[in-house]
Image: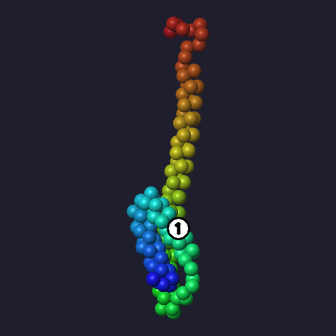
Amino acid sequence: MSDASGRLDLYADMLVRSRAMLESANQQEWDALIQQRARFVADVEKLRREPETDRLTEQERRHCAELLEEILEHDRAIRERLDARCEELSQLIGSSRRQQALMRAYNQGQGKLSQRMRPSPGTEGRT
């Protein structure tokens, strides 16, 4: 296998992985996305270490460009899904914080209310 065909195979593998990552993002399978992302990064590192001794032909360069365009489109779509998920989580965290603050205020109010409801010393047993 020449270096050029090895590079093309790596790009093709990265495209397959990016498709799987997009599918995981679309299905909101975040753990699967993270696992696939780790393998994608490993492929990128492998590509980076791949020697460039063989030059790509014009046809191979066009094919690489097409693969990269699709990979980048998948990356954009994945980022959109992740941004939406971050916004959703941010809203959930904000809602949880408001709920906790309300519970604290309610519990503090309960204490004050129970103090008011207790008979004052010396009035116990009187009606």
Note whether 6 is above or below 97 in the view shown: below
Residue in the foreground of this view, choosing between 84 and 47: 47
Place of residue 100 in the rendered image (x, y in percent of width and height, measured from the top left): 54, 40
9 or 21, which lies in front?
9
Q: Quadrant of the N terminus?
A: bottom left
Towards the viewer: 33 or 27: 33
In x, y percent, where is residue 36? Answer: 45, 64
Instruction: Report the number of numbered marks.
Output: 1
- Give the residue pinned by disc 1: 41
State the scheme by which the image is colored: rainbow
Identity of the residue furthest to the front in this view: 1
Instruction: Give, as a three-letter code, the residue at label 1.
Output: Val
Q: Residues within 10 Å of mark 1 (few under 14, many from 20)?
A: few
Residue shown at 56%/25% (left/top)? 111
- Residue extending furthest bottom? 58
Residue 3, horizontal then vertical, whole percent: 51, 83
Q: Can the viewer see residue 64 in this picture?
A: no
Q: Is residue 103 visible?
A: yes
Q: Is residue 29 above or below residue 77?
A: above
Q: Is residue 79 above or below residue 89?
A: below
Mark 1 element type: helix
Residue 102 at x, y = what percent? 55, 39
Residue name at image x 51 percent, y 76 percent = 72
Q: Residue at x 59, y 13 (%)?
A: 120
Which of 58 and 49 lies nearest the eye of the viewer?
49
Q: Residue at x 52, y 42 (%)?
A: 99
